[in-house]
């Protein structure tokens, strides 16, 4: 299985180039910050009018990851919808695609700060969940152990032939993983920012998504 292999709290995990996290022994796939409906929400609230294609693009990539990993359980780590109305207003076609992805597997929606409440699109809605040695929640907690969270949309830069390019990144240390955002229209917080360094240990790594995956010491990541 393609990806960066590591262990967290005795669980063997694979951080995949697309920005998902696989727990092979449990056949469990984790995705964070899908932000479905961001363009609809911004238009509804009088913000910038964005091309309305992010839902289908995000779903295309999500379908590809599920096809590649064949999980029995999918955990979405919150902010799956850009707000509750974006979830309720989702058009019939993406609703059907989500229903098809949920068929035959356990699907868990973790509540985020954008979607702190149930959405009427199948699955189980929880504030957080602990499965074996791992706890899944939206926002990291300072004293957590074996925690997988999202919320911050970390990004980091790596030197390439074309110069310095910022990519979504996993942050990984011995206590926790902070996931990159998976949604198409999501910005990001620099991995080296004070907020993220304050959560991670001095030995933490930033693992850039994409190909090739690049692991950098978090201490080497710029704060902006």
Image (cartoon, rainbow, N blue to C red):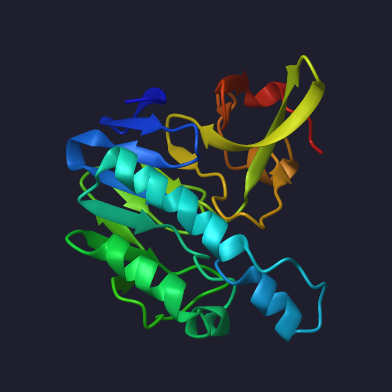
Q: Please tell me whether residue 73 is drawn above or below residue 24 in the rendered image.
A: below
Q: Please tell me whether residue 117 is drawn above or below residue 75 in the rendered image.
A: below
User: Residue 222 at what x, y percent from top left?
Assistant: 78, 30
The residue shown at (20%, 59%) is 105
User: Residue 169 at what x, y percent from top left?
Assistant: 59, 36
The quadrant in which residue 47 appears is: bottom right
The quadrant in which residue 27 appears is: top left
Q: Is residue 117 visible?
A: yes
Which of the image's four quarters has the N terminus? top left
| Camera-side residue of 195 and 109 | 109
Q: Is residue 127 visible?
A: no
Which of the image's four quarters has the C terminus? top right
| Camera-side residue of 138 and 70 | 70
The residue shown at (56%, 56%) is 57
Q: Is residue 69 left or right of residue 203?
A: left
User: Residue 16 at what x, y percent from top left?
Assistant: 44, 33
The residue shown at (55%, 31%) is 201
| Camera-side residue of 60 and 183 | 60
User: Residue 187 at what x, y percent from top left?
Assistant: 71, 52
The residue shown at (62%, 20%) is 216
| Camera-side residue of 59 and 84 | 59
């Amino acid at each position: 299985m393609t990806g960066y292999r590591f262990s967290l709290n005795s669980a063997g995990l694979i951080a995949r180039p697309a920005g998902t996290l696989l727990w092979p022994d449990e056949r469990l796939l984790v995705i964070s910050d899908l932000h479905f409906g961001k363009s609809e929400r911004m238009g509804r609230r009088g913000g910038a009018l964005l091309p309305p294609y992010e839902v289908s693009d995000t779903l295309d990539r999500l379908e590809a990851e599920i096809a590649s990993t064949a999980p029995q359980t999918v955990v979405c780590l919150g902010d799956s919808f850009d707000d509750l109305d974006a979830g309720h207003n989702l058009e019939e076609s993406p609703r059907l695609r989500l229903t098809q992805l949920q068929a035959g597997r356990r699907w868990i929606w973790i509540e985020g700060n954008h979607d702190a409440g149930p959405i009427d699109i199948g699955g189980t809605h929880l504030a957080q969940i602990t499965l074996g040695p791992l706890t899944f929640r939206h926002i990291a907690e300072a004293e957590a152990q074996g925690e997988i969270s999202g919320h911050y949309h970390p990004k980091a830069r790596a030197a390439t032939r074309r110069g310095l390019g910022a990519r979504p990144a996993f942050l990984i240390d011995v206590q926790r993983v902070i996931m990159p955002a998976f949604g198409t229209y999501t910005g990001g917080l620099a991995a080296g920012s004070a907020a993220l360094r304050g959560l991670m240990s001095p030995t933490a790594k930033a693992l850039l998504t994409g190909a090739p995956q690049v692991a950098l010491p978090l201490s080497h990541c710029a704060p902006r």
